[in-house]
Image: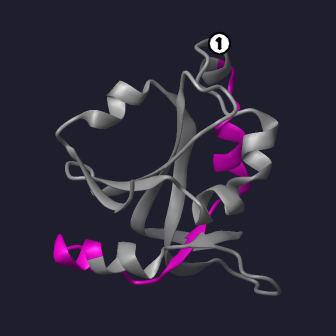
Amino acid sequence: MTVGALPLTVIHRLLDNDVEVSSAAITATRGRVARMRRELKIDIGEALDDVDIDRLPETLARAEQVLLDTEKRNLLFVFAPADPAASGKIVVEVNYADRVKLHGARRKERITTNAILSAGYVDPDNLRQARYRRVDGG
């Protein structure tokens, strides 16, 4: 399902960093959303709560900042969760190749999208690593 779109400023900054974008769409599968609440993440306090999961489209549209992971070439959409001691992040893989069954289709089709890989709460200091380059926001 489509949950958002890459802002035009982010697309331009990706191009400046030699990353071409095939689509502006940001998508999430039910399986990826379920993994955001898996037991391991809950046990270590990194799992998004249901409120933050329900707000994914709004959070992507209003992220405080967007970071480019220069090693993995993923985007991190950073947001402020209800707990002020943490930061929230949504990890999006740019140009993710997937096979999906489109509505009414008999077979799976190949698509290229920007897919949410994971999301969770993180210590804000972890987002200050040299590998992260700000491409939008704060």
Indicate whether 70 appears above or below 104. Answer: above
Q: Nearer the viewer, residue 124 or 27?
A: 124
Q: Which amino acid does label 1 sit on?
A: Asp
Is disc 1 placed on a helix, strand or loop? helix
* Residue drawn at 28 percent across, 35 percent down: 128
Q: Where is residue 99 in the image (x, y as percent from the top left)?
A: 56, 71
Q: Is residue 31 magenta?
A: yes
Q: Which residue is drawn at 64% across and 36% down?
A: 81
- The residue sitting at 39% across, 53% down in the picture is 138
Q: How many marks?
A: 1
The location of residue 106, given as percent across then percent down, is 76, 84
| Left or right, 84 with reference to 134 | right
Does 11 sit above or below residue 91? below
State the residue in front, 16 or 137.
137
For this view, does 100 lie left or right of residue 122?
right
Outermost residue toward the top in this view: 43
In x, y percent, where is residue 110? 52, 80
Residue 67 located within the stretch drawn in magenta: no
In front of the other: 19 or 123? 123
User: Is 20 left or right of 106, judged from the image as shown?
Assistant: left
Which residue is labeled 1 in the image? Answer: 43
- Report the residue at 34% width, 36% height from top: 127
The one nearer the camera, 129 or 46, is 129
Does residue 50 lie above or below 93 as drawn? Answer: above
Q: Quick one: quadrant of the N terminus?
A: bottom right
| Image color mode | one colour
Picture coordinates of residue 47, whole percent (x, y) = 65, 28
Neighbor class of circle 1 (other Cα within 10 Å; few <14, some 14-19, many 20+) is few
Q: Where does the magenta region start and end?
A: 13-39
Residue 36 sits in quarter: top right
Q: In this view, does 136 lie above or below 8?
A: above
